[in-house]
Amino acid sequence: MDGFAIYKSEFGYLRMEYEKGKIIYLKKIQGTPKENGAKTELTDEVFEQLTEYLAGRRKKFDFPYELRGTEFQKKAWAELEKIPYGQTRTYGQQAAAMGRPKASRAVGMANHCNPIIIVVPCHRVIGANGNLTGYGGGLPMKEALLKLEAENK
Protein backbone atom coordinates (compact mmCIF):
# COMPACT_ATOMS: atom_id res chain seq x y z
CA MET A 1 0.00 0.00 0.00
CA ASP A 2 1.33 3.41 -0.98
CA GLY A 3 -1.11 5.33 1.18
CA PHE A 4 -4.65 5.92 2.32
CA ALA A 5 -7.20 8.68 2.59
CA ILE A 6 -10.36 9.06 4.62
CA TYR A 7 -13.42 10.97 3.49
CA LYS A 8 -16.65 11.72 5.32
CA SER A 9 -19.77 10.56 3.49
CA GLU A 10 -23.46 10.47 4.32
CA PHE A 11 -22.88 6.94 5.67
CA GLY A 12 -19.92 7.86 7.86
CA TYR A 13 -16.22 7.73 7.15
CA LEU A 14 -14.87 5.87 4.12
CA ARG A 15 -11.28 4.67 4.02
CA MET A 16 -9.55 4.29 0.66
CA GLU A 17 -6.19 2.62 0.26
CA TYR A 18 -4.20 2.99 -2.92
CA GLU A 19 -1.15 1.48 -4.52
CA LYS A 20 0.53 2.17 -7.86
CA GLY A 21 -2.27 4.43 -9.06
CA LYS A 22 -5.11 2.02 -8.19
CA ILE A 23 -7.59 1.78 -5.35
CA ILE A 24 -7.11 -1.51 -3.50
CA TYR A 25 -9.50 -0.95 -0.58
CA LEU A 26 -12.66 1.07 0.01
CA LYS A 27 -14.64 0.43 3.17
CA LYS A 28 -16.76 2.21 5.72
CA ILE A 29 -14.98 2.54 9.05
CA GLN A 30 -16.41 2.81 12.54
CA GLY A 31 -15.98 5.87 14.70
CA THR A 32 -13.98 9.00 14.01
CA PRO A 33 -10.55 8.44 12.46
CA LYS A 34 -7.47 9.69 14.31
CA GLU A 35 -5.80 10.64 11.04
CA ASN A 36 -7.04 11.30 7.52
CA GLY A 37 -4.11 9.95 5.52
CA ALA A 38 -2.98 11.61 2.31
CA LYS A 39 -5.61 12.60 -0.23
CA THR A 40 -4.52 12.44 -3.86
CA GLU A 41 -6.02 13.24 -7.25
CA LEU A 42 -7.04 9.57 -7.43
CA THR A 43 -8.80 9.52 -4.05
CA ASP A 44 -10.47 12.86 -4.80
CA GLU A 45 -11.74 11.40 -8.11
CA VAL A 46 -13.03 8.28 -6.34
CA PHE A 47 -14.84 10.37 -3.74
CA GLU A 48 -16.31 12.59 -6.48
CA GLN A 49 -17.64 9.51 -8.31
CA LEU A 50 -19.08 8.13 -5.06
CA THR A 51 -20.74 11.48 -4.38
CA GLU A 52 -22.27 11.45 -7.88
CA TYR A 53 -23.47 7.87 -7.34
CA LEU A 54 -25.05 8.73 -3.99
CA ALA A 55 -26.79 11.72 -5.60
CA GLY A 56 -28.28 9.40 -8.25
CA ARG A 57 -26.20 10.90 -11.07
CA ARG A 58 -23.78 8.00 -11.67
CA LYS A 59 -24.46 4.32 -12.34
CA LYS A 60 -20.96 3.09 -13.22
CA PHE A 61 -17.52 3.82 -11.84
CA ASP A 62 -14.50 4.31 -14.06
CA PHE A 63 -11.53 4.81 -11.77
CA PRO A 64 -8.73 2.24 -11.62
CA TYR A 65 -8.95 -0.41 -8.92
CA GLU A 66 -7.54 -3.84 -8.24
CA LEU A 67 -9.31 -6.64 -6.41
CA ARG A 68 -7.03 -8.75 -4.26
CA GLY A 69 -8.15 -12.04 -2.79
CA THR A 70 -8.28 -15.78 -3.39
CA GLU A 71 -9.24 -17.12 -6.80
CA PHE A 72 -12.70 -18.05 -5.47
CA GLN A 73 -13.19 -14.55 -4.04
CA LYS A 74 -12.13 -12.95 -7.32
CA LYS A 75 -14.66 -15.10 -9.20
CA ALA A 76 -17.40 -14.12 -6.74
CA TRP A 77 -16.51 -10.44 -7.06
CA ALA A 78 -16.45 -10.70 -10.86
CA GLU A 79 -20.05 -11.96 -10.69
CA LEU A 80 -20.98 -9.01 -8.47
CA GLU A 81 -19.68 -6.65 -11.13
CA LYS A 82 -22.12 -8.22 -13.63
CA ILE A 83 -25.23 -7.35 -11.58
CA PRO A 84 -26.82 -4.36 -13.31
CA TYR A 85 -27.54 -1.13 -11.48
CA GLY A 86 -30.95 -1.29 -9.81
CA GLN A 87 -31.17 -5.10 -9.86
CA THR A 88 -30.53 -7.76 -7.25
CA ARG A 89 -29.45 -11.39 -7.19
CA THR A 90 -29.58 -14.00 -4.46
CA TYR A 91 -26.48 -15.72 -3.14
CA GLY A 92 -27.74 -18.89 -4.81
CA GLN A 93 -28.06 -17.14 -8.16
CA GLN A 94 -24.57 -15.73 -7.79
CA ALA A 95 -23.18 -19.17 -6.92
CA ALA A 96 -24.99 -20.77 -9.88
CA ALA A 97 -23.61 -18.11 -12.23
CA MET A 98 -20.13 -19.08 -11.01
CA GLY A 99 -20.83 -22.73 -11.85
CA ARG A 100 -20.95 -23.61 -8.14
CA PRO A 101 -24.70 -23.89 -7.39
CA LYS A 102 -24.20 -25.37 -3.91
CA ALA A 103 -21.69 -22.73 -2.81
CA SER A 104 -24.07 -19.96 -1.73
CA ARG A 105 -22.59 -19.80 1.79
CA ALA A 106 -19.06 -19.59 0.41
CA VAL A 107 -20.24 -16.87 -1.95
CA GLY A 108 -21.67 -15.00 1.03
CA MET A 109 -18.33 -15.19 2.80
CA ALA A 110 -16.50 -14.00 -0.32
CA ASN A 111 -18.91 -11.08 -0.64
CA HIS A 112 -18.30 -10.24 3.01
CA CYS A 113 -14.58 -9.93 2.16
CA ASN A 114 -15.22 -7.60 -0.80
CA PRO A 115 -12.46 -4.98 -0.44
CA ILE A 116 -14.19 -2.28 -2.52
CA ILE A 117 -17.77 -1.69 -1.36
CA ILE A 118 -20.38 0.13 -3.44
CA VAL A 119 -18.19 -0.03 -6.58
CA VAL A 120 -18.13 -3.84 -6.49
CA PRO A 121 -21.82 -4.04 -5.61
CA CYS A 122 -22.20 -6.70 -2.94
CA HIS A 123 -25.15 -4.63 -1.67
CA ARG A 124 -27.11 -5.99 -4.66
CA VAL A 125 -27.10 -9.53 -3.25
CA ILE A 126 -30.04 -10.53 -1.07
CA GLY A 127 -31.27 -13.63 0.72
CA ALA A 128 -33.21 -16.38 -1.10
CA ASN A 129 -36.41 -15.22 0.62
CA GLY A 130 -35.91 -11.66 -0.63
CA ASN A 131 -34.78 -10.33 2.74
CA LEU A 132 -31.76 -8.15 3.16
CA THR A 133 -28.87 -10.01 4.71
CA GLY A 134 -25.48 -8.97 6.06
CA TYR A 135 -23.51 -6.09 4.61
CA GLY A 136 -20.15 -4.71 5.69
CA GLY A 137 -21.53 -1.18 5.80
CA GLY A 138 -24.55 -2.30 7.85
CA LEU A 139 -28.08 -3.16 6.77
CA PRO A 140 -29.33 0.46 6.86
CA MET A 141 -26.63 1.38 4.31
CA LYS A 142 -27.50 -1.65 2.15
CA GLU A 143 -31.18 -0.73 2.23
CA ALA A 144 -30.41 2.90 1.34
CA LEU A 145 -28.19 1.89 -1.60
CA LEU A 146 -30.83 -0.46 -3.00
CA LYS A 147 -33.53 2.21 -2.59
CA LEU A 148 -31.30 4.80 -4.31
CA GLU A 149 -30.75 2.48 -7.27
CA ALA A 150 -34.43 1.53 -7.51
CA GLU A 151 -35.40 5.21 -7.64
CA ASN A 152 -32.78 6.11 -10.27
CA LYS A 153 -32.92 3.17 -12.70
Image: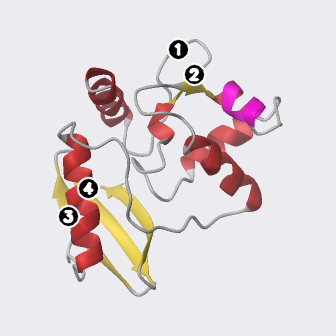
Position above or below: 128 against 104: above
Q: Residue furthest top?
A: 129
Q: For the C terminus, which image quadrant?
A: top left
Q: Earlier in the sequence, mark 2 or mark 4?
A: 4
Residue nearest the viewer, comparing 11 with 100: 100
Asked if residue 47 lies left or right of residue 111, the reply is left
Disc 3 vs disc 1: Cβ atoms closer than 8 Å?
no
Q: Position of residue 15 (x, y in %)?
A: 31, 65
Q: Position of residue 132 (x, y in %)?
A: 46, 23
- C-alpha separation, residue under disc 3 versus residue under disc 1: 32 Å
The label on residue 127 is 2
Position above or below: 109 against 94: below
Amino acid, disc 4: Gln
Residue displayed at 27% across by 71% down:
43
- C-alpha separation, residue under disc 3 versus residue under disc 4: 13 Å
* Of the two numbered discs 1 and 4 in the rendering, the one whose residue sits closer to the viewer: 4
* Of the two numbered discs 2 and 4 in the rendering, the one whose residue sits closer to the viewer: 4
Label 3 CA crowd tier, 10 Å (few <14, some 14–19, many 20+): some
* Of the two numbered discs 3 and 4 in the rendering, the one whose residue sits closer to the viewer: 4
Position above or below: 34 against 119: below
The label on residue 7 is 3
